[in-house]
Amino acid sequence: MAMSSDAAGDGAPRPLTVASDTCRNCGAHAPGHYCGNCGQETRLTLPTFPAFMREAAGRYVALDGRLWRTLATLVARPGFLTLEYLRGRRKRYIRPARLFLVLYLVLFAVIGLVQPPTGLSDEVVFVDARPTGPGTDEVPAPDGAPATTAAAGRNARGGPLFELDKDLNLTLRVGDEAVPLPPAVRKRWDQFRTLPREEKAERIYAGILRYGPYAMVALLPVFALLLKLAYLGRGRAYPQRPRRYAEHLVYGAHLHAFAAAMLLVLVVVPWPIARVPVVLWVVYYAMRSRHVVYGGRWWAGALRALVIGLTYLMLLGLAMAALVVASVMLR
């Protein structure tokens, strides 16, 4: 192998010269397009600008035929992408974890662009709060009117764990009493309550956008665990049904990725009438994809899906409340 490292007259290094069938990375004999020892390509040329950008983005979202093939299959063929992965046909599609993460990052980024923080209160449904009194963390409404809050979760005595009032003040409760906070935490909590309502909305909104993808990443393995528990059994009647936790995780990643894609459509489509078929497709997709992947009787699958869905909605509500708490406490 002959190499030259002499510098050009202007001080710029000369390109190394090697035999055409030698890998420039490891020096192994590589007569094909790729080195059999280290995997680097052997036909090396400087990329054009489109090729350069495609290579840079491809490491994250695979901006080539795989991206569009994966998205089209994900949206149009319920459950098929999961079956392809479990059967070992993976090269032609983006992997489930990457697809899941990229779509949720794009979703929260798009929401931040098209939804202003001032509209946060319009998206919250307020309910009547509990009566205020000594020891609580409530501020009575003016003129004796009942305060209104948005509640998430329930404590052991049936009351809401989290309450967000019309002034965007958050309260944590156990029974009828507000949760006592450590002094350092209480100081930051009180500082948030003194902010103007618009600034509170911006703080909460920014926190949800910032920590939302992390919350979804945390919820995905929980969803897979719910699937695992719902489909416990020996599987004699349906031997092809997913049994291992990792298989449920793949299905959960694809289902969540589909949900992110549909939420993107709902966010960017400005006409309410156009959102109706999207919602109908989401309902059909959820039922059909479960049947394609897990099989079984429709009524048994619908019962499992109902239990999983209700449990997951409760966990999602708690996650959203945790996002609000993180928005208040973390900067």
Image: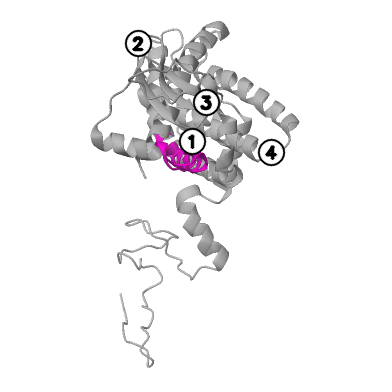
- Count residues near mark 4 (Cα–Cα under 10 Å), then give few for <14, some for 14-19, many for 20+: few
Residue 318 appears in view: yes
Mark 1 Cα-neighbour bin, 10 Å: few <14, some 14–19, many ≥20: few
Q: Amino acid at mark 4?
A: Val
Name the side, left or right, on which 10 lies relative to 73. Answer: left
The disc label shown at residue 156, or none = 2
Q: Which mark is residue 89?
A: 1
Type of amino acid under label 2: Ala
* Residue at left offset 56%, top offset 24%: 125
Question: On the image, numbered disc 3 is attached to which residue?
Answer: 142
Q: Check whether the beta carbons of the residues at disc 2 and disc 1 lie within 8 A of each other.
A: no
Which range of residues does the magenta coloring cover?
Answer: 193-215
For discs 4 and 3, the disc positioned in front in the rendered view:
3
Q: For the residue labelled by badge 2, is the local secondary structure a helix, a strand or a loop?
A: loop
**Which residue position is annotated with label 4?**
269
Q: Main secondary structure of the magenta part?
A: helix
Crowd band around label 3 with a 10 angstrom C-alpha radius: few (<14), some (14–19), many (20+) = few
Q: Earlier in the sequence, mark 4 or mark 3?
A: 3
Give x and y (percent) for residue 251.
47, 27
